[in-house]
Image: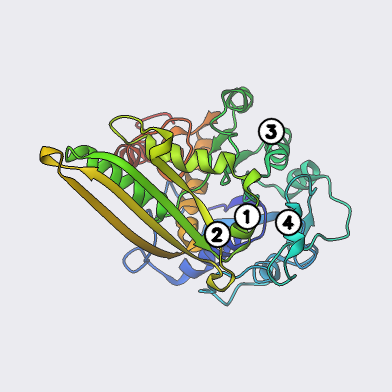
Amino acid sequence: MSKIKIAIVGIGNCASSLIQGIYYYKDKNPEDAIGLMHWKIGEWDPTDIEVVAAFDIDKRKVGKTIDEAIFAKPNCTTVFQEEIPKSDVKVCMGPVLDGVSEHMADFEEDYTFVVADEEPVDVVEVLKESGAEILLSYLPVGSEEAARFYAQCALDANIAYINCMPVFIVSDPEWDAKFREKGIPIVGDDIKAQIGATITHRTLSNLFKERGVKLDHTYQINTGGNTDFMNMLNRKRLDSKKESKTEAVQAVLAERMDPHDIHIGPSDYVPWQKDNKVCFLRMEGRTFGDVPMEIELRLSVEDSPNSAGCVIDAIRCCKLGLERGIGGQLTSISSYVMKHPPEQFTDDEAAAKVEAFIKGEIER
């Protein structure tokens, strides 16, 4: 059986976790494979994915082979699979565009991006020559111009697109129409974690609704020490991120909360946390007789492996879409693994729709 051939934009912590996972599960079987929502989707298990092209802008990654680049600085995620086969695929220099915030230059090289002194490649040409079927975007938060550039590259190369970052491509009707016209599937926007801040917040919010509790105030504040959190110190880059995370929670409430009563967003960069993300969650509500109640929760997760568990399903569902000739938004898997999908459903509904999509019972 042929592999699912993917190209990746951004060889950071998330890409590192995904690629480590592809090889980590090679020696596993369905019974003892921890951390997967699906062992098989269609014909493909987690090891049936091959990276055939990669793009980055950091001098420590550009020109390196994939197996070297995923462990290069400033990557700092957990290494759970040290043995990665030597790859023939080298990381290409992509266009910088708005992918690097100016404030990132104020930090030490080991922790921040260092732009390579190289000319960018012709991305579309590389994609075509590589044989990639899907382009996976791990661009930094706030990279609005770069996100649209790579989405257009996917269109021009006639390959599917998975948008893991919070620029609204897949949930934009205009982009959807472009991919529908070409018969190319797209999944997005803004990847969730398997068990992360957003899915936990959504689940508790839905519980309040189902148990008749009025949610009056809530916040979700997150800290971390990877380049994602460093990048988000520039609050000007956060508009789409805050909207994505807030909408993910608002969508499961009985009625929308006043914007003054709900605060969801990154809080601060703590270097020693590295890829560990800590979420502080508070919910204030009223139960029977308007009697007040409160929940306070602290969640600690390794950020990038947490997202890889969702991406590995998104890739395989996207391949199913390609096999079936579906163009445009894949709403089932998008609602299941993305914070800002084209259509929001409760998590139970989204899970049921993904199962129906995998079985071919629904189109998308």
Which secondary structure lies at badge 4? helix
User: Could you give the CA–CA distance between mark 4 and mark 1, rounded to whole angstroms?
Assistant: 8 Å
Q: In this picture, is 33 found above or below 212?
A: below
Q: Nearer the viewer, residue 82 or 273?
A: 273
Tags 4 and 1 touching, CB below 8 Å: yes
> Mark 3 belongs to which amino acid?
Leu
* Label 4 CA crowd tier, 10 Å (few <14, some 14–19, many 20+): few
Which residue is tagged 2? 268
Residue 258 percent location from the top left of the image: 39, 32
Which residue is tagged 1? 233
* Label 3 CA crowd tier, 10 Å (few <14, some 14–19, many 20+): some
Residue 22 visible in the snapshot: yes
User: Could you give the CA–CA distance between mark 3 and mark 4, rounded to whole angstroms?
Assistant: 32 Å
Q: In this picture, is 78 found above or below 162?
A: below
From the image, state whether disc 3 or disc 2 is nearer to you. 2
User: Could you give the CA–CA distance between mark 2 and mark 1, rounded to whole angstroms?
Assistant: 7 Å
Residue 142 percent location from the top left of the image: 65, 45
Which secondary structure lies at badge 2? strand
* Label 1 CA crowd tier, 10 Å (few <14, some 14–19, many 20+): some
Residue drawn at (53%, 63%) of the image: 224
Residue drawn at (81%, 59%) of the image: 115
Residue 120 percent location from the top left of the image: 84, 50
Question: In this image, 88 relative to 334: left or right?
Answer: right
Which residue is tagged 3? 155
Tags 3 and 1 touching, CB below 8 Å: no
Q: Earlier in the sequence, mark 3 or mark 2?
A: 3
